[in-house]
Amino acid sequence: MAPRSKTTRLAAASPGSIAAAAACLRAGGLVAVPTETVYGLAADATSDAAVATIYAAKDRPAINPLIAHVLDLEAAREHAVFGPEAERLANAFWPGPLTLVLPVAPTCRISLLARAGLETVALRSPAHETARALIEAAGAPLAAPSANRSGRVSATTAAHVVADLDGRVDWILDGGPCRYGLESTIVEIIAGLPRLLRPGAITREAIESALGSPIESAVGSPAAPNAPGQLASHYAPNADLRLGAADARADEAALDFAGLLKESAAGARLDLSPAGDLIEAASHLFSYLRALDAGGAARIAVAPIPDYGLGAAINDRLRRAAAPRTG
Ligand code: TXA
Ligand code: MG
């Protein structure tokens, strides 16, 4: 599916352009914004619908979890649980090119889609003044992957963003070349155990010296973001999934798309997008799976989803959710 063609406005970052771009974000739009690492492709992180358009604009083959950008540690605490190790790293490196992957807090407002259904959330407080001004003006955390088409390298100038995303985003704020040009370092901290998921703009040595202890490396391991196709901790419902179903049987709940599933059973039924819109379908995927799961069905019949555009990403997630559990 080709994302709907947008008129992309390119503007030097200024109070005026930032205010206009922030208004666009509040209305569910997409804004490319410079950070000190690479340009980010930002949307309101609290909106499944807005986040879905990020995946569509990037042609992302898989729905990978995204980093939510916040102003500071105070703002971050609403979304994640900070233990002593996370506090120490945030105090040492924020604002700056460090992303922390932490357990979600009960008050977390980051959309399930941005989290790819995980019980962890990636948070970063960027240092770049344009990114900070945009977060503040939008009044929301901003989900932002690197502002490049999938399979291309990250964009470090506004010209790179134009080359990849012209016609796919609403605004491109030009803040000149990025200072680091390399993505943030990602550290996951679960149950007090810090692990390096992605090397980046902050060195491992600097992290270890802030922590006062060596850090385990999970780079290249199945859970590392470098191998997102193999994320071990992807969302898996309790119910078994039956993909590509033509109808829902008596003992099954139904996850429909575009009304394709034949009416049969009286079980719970949700349609990802009655109109057959893949962007809308992606935005509902994780929340609908959870809702059907919560109903207690042993199995969920899933309608066939077209395997192009965001449909490919949806199918990627569904296949993993349907895969036999390895414990
Ligand atoms: O410097 C950066 O980090 C840039 C700027 C824009 O902030 N962003 C960036 O985003 O590089 P992206 O989407 O290209 O990379 C984010 C990485 C992905 O590899 C993803 O798998 C990982 O973060 N990630 C996000 N949430 C995660 C989670 N809950 N658990 C494990 N990995 C996660
Ligand atoms: Mg990237």
Image (tube, helix red, strand yellow):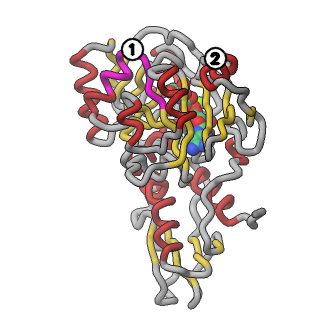
Q: Position of residue 111 (x, y in %)?
A: 43, 50
Q: Is mark 1 within 8 Å of ligand 1?
A: no
Q: How many marks can you see?
A: 2
Question: Which secondary structure lies at badge 2?
Answer: helix
User: Residue 153, position in %: x, y?
Assistant: 63, 23
Mark 1: which amino acid?
A: Asp
| Spot occupied by residue 214 in the image (x, y as percentages of width and height) | 73, 27
Question: Is 60 in front, or is 323?
Answer: 323
Q: Is residue 237 above or below residue 308?
A: below
- Mark drawn on residue 174: 1
Q: Residue at x 73, y 48 (%)?
A: 230
Q: CA distance from mark 1 to mark 2?
A: 30 Å
Q: Give the quarter the ligand 2 occupies.
A: top right
- Using the image as rendered, state which of residue 248 and residue 73 is in the foreground: 73
Query: Residue 132: within the magenta?
Result: yes
Q: Which residues are magenta?
A: 124-134
The residue drawn where x is 76% and y is 44% is: 222
Q: Residues within 10 Å of mark 2 (few under 14, many from 20)?
A: few
Residue at position x 54%, y 30% from top? 99
Q: Is residue 146 highlighted in magenta?
A: no
The residue at the point 68 percent across, 21 percent down is 204
Locate residue 40 relative to residue 78 in the image: left or right.
right
Which one is in front, 87 or 254?
Answer: 87
Rendered-image quadrant of the C terminus: bottom right
Task: Tell me, yes or no, if residue 146 can be seen here.
Answer: no
Question: Residue 206: which disc?
Answer: 2
Among the two numbered marks 1 and 2 on one chain, the one whose residue lies closer to the N terminus: 1
Mark 1 burial class by Cα count in 10 Å: few <14, some 14-19, many 20+: many
Task: Look at the numbered disc 1 and give the secondary structure of its residue.
Answer: strand
Q: Is residue 263 above or below residue 63?
A: below
